[in-house]
Image: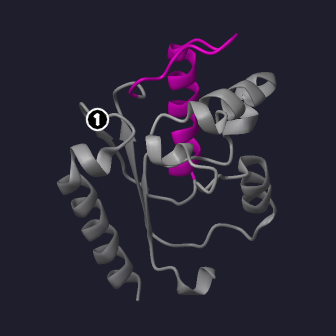
Amino acid sequence: HADQVRGVVFVDGFSASIPALFGSRWPIYRDQGLNPPVDQMPVPSMREPESERVDLDASVAEVLAGPAFPDVPVAVLTKTEPFAGLKPLPGLPADETNRLYERAQDELVALSPDTPQTFATGSDHYIQFSQPDLVVAATELIERRAAIRS
């Protein structure tokens, strides 16, 4: 529904380029880092059998097969701290996981010309919790840019 989108703010967003960046290590990150078995989920409410699960490969495939990203203002907020509690995975050290994820942020910045990338100094992945004012400021910036385009 690109016709309904006036702007986008990515808050340490997951780029569809992540599986390609991880290459042969993608299944390790997907299955053990992002979607571990239900009994190993980090949050107790996610350990329930009815907890929501995301088919990451299907989601990425849908994004890649979808229409071009709309010509709208974009802002990208990027964490500066490692993922909290990220454990090394077999063949995939935690620092490598963080480095690859951060590299994927460049793909989000490239979606639209003049995209500001703001580094949320001191924040891990959950910028909306640690620096909600930064999220609000980025949203207000995109609202102003969208209004100018209208």
**Between 101 and 89, the one nearer to me in the picture:** 89
Quadrant assignment for the N terminus? bottom right
Q: Residue 78: x, y in percent?
A: 39, 41
Q: Which residue is mark 1?
A: 123
Residue 15 vertical position relative to residue 115 in the rendered view, above or below: above
Point out the stretch of residues depicted in magenta: 84-110
**Between 10 and 29, the one nearer to me in the picture:** 29
Residue in the image at 72% along x and 60% along y: 63
Q: Is residue 118 magenta?
A: no
* Secondary element type, mark 1: loop
Residue in the image at 23% along x and 63% along y: 136
Residue 22 vertical position relative to residue 94 in the rendered view, above or below: below
Q: Is residue 130 left or right of residue 72?
A: left
**Between 55 and 48, the one nearer to me in the picture:** 48
Q: Residue 39: x, y in percent?
A: 60, 34
Residue type, label 1? Ser
